[in-house]
Amino acid sequence: MNFDRLRFVAERAEIGEKREALLAVSIPEIPGSFRKFCTLLGSRNITEFNYRYADPSVAQVFVGVQVKDPSETEKLVATLEKNNLHTLDLTDNEMAKLHLRHLVGGRAPEAKDEIIYRFEFPERPGALMNFLNSMNHNWNISLFHYRNHGADYGRVLVGMQVPHKDKKELKQFLDTLGYPHWDESGNPAYQLFLG
């Protein structure tokens, strides 16, 4: 038994006991819609976020959310649907659990002015909303990947469409935010598979 195996067992136990919901959610591809979506998730613990810009009108988000039981999943799906966010419950979908969660992404040639940053978010409620509320609301999030690794901090990869004229404001945002961060825009892995 190693740490990778323990993570796998923990993930499968949460899903098997219906304490994690896996959802595919369609949201409008406009600045601010990701923040609205996160607000609708409420104070639930997010176990995973996967998103990559692919279409100029609709964004497909793959999200894992900790729930108490299947009835909470049903209520969450109803809330999202009521707010015009088409939602598909993938909790019992084997392909989604085993493969899809690791494959969301790809190139986004229409994501103009994209920069990629790797962050360490504090692993506490409100860290994501603090990030979203602090950033310029005109910048579009073009990529977002987070997966709970059980650490004291969350490892997050974020793509943002930041016009060149806003570079000074970006630096100010990053300094004020205070989360450890690294510019990965020149990373060869990003260039090969996501850029």
Image: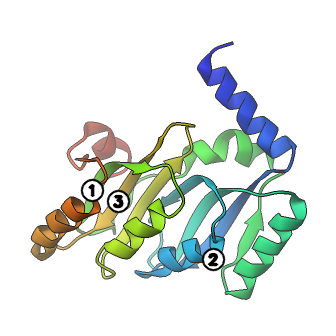
* Quadrant of the image occupied by residue 41: bottom right
- Give the residue drawn at x 63%, y 77%: 40
Earlier sequence position, callout 2 versus callout 1: 2
Q: Tell me the mark number nearer the camera, choosing from 3 and 1.
A: 1
| Kind of residue indicated by mark 2 | Leu
* Quadrant of the image occupied by residue 4: top right
x, y percent for residue 125:
54, 60
Judged from the image, the secondary structure of the residue bearing numbered disc 3 is strand
Task: Please give left or right for residue 119 compared with residue 129 in the image.
Answer: left
- Give the residue drawn at x 22%, y 64%: 176
Looking at the image, what colour scheme do you see? rainbow
- Residue sitting nearer the eye, 161 or 149: 149
Cα distance in 3D space between marks 2 and 1:
25 Å
x, y percent for residue 150:
57, 37
Cα distance in 3D space between marks 2 and 3:
22 Å
| Kind of residue indicated by mark 3 | Gly
Q: Tell me, for residue 116, which label it has, or none.
A: none
Q: Which residue corresponds to mark 2?
A: 40
- Whether residue 136 is situated above or below residue 176 in the rendered picture: below
Earlier sequence position, callout 2 versus callout 3: 2
Q: Which residue corresponds to mark 3?
A: 159
| Kind of residue indicated by mark 1 | Gly
Res. 100 visible in picture: yes
Cα distance in 3D space between marks 3 and 1:
18 Å
- Circles 3 and 1 in contact, beta carbons < 8 Å: no
- Residue sitting nearer the eye, 106 or 170: 170
Q: Tell me the mark number nearer the camera, choosing from 2 and 1.
A: 1
Q: Which residue corresponds to mark 1?
A: 178
x, y percent for residue 141:
39, 68
- Circles 2 and 3 in contact, beta carbons < 8 Å: no
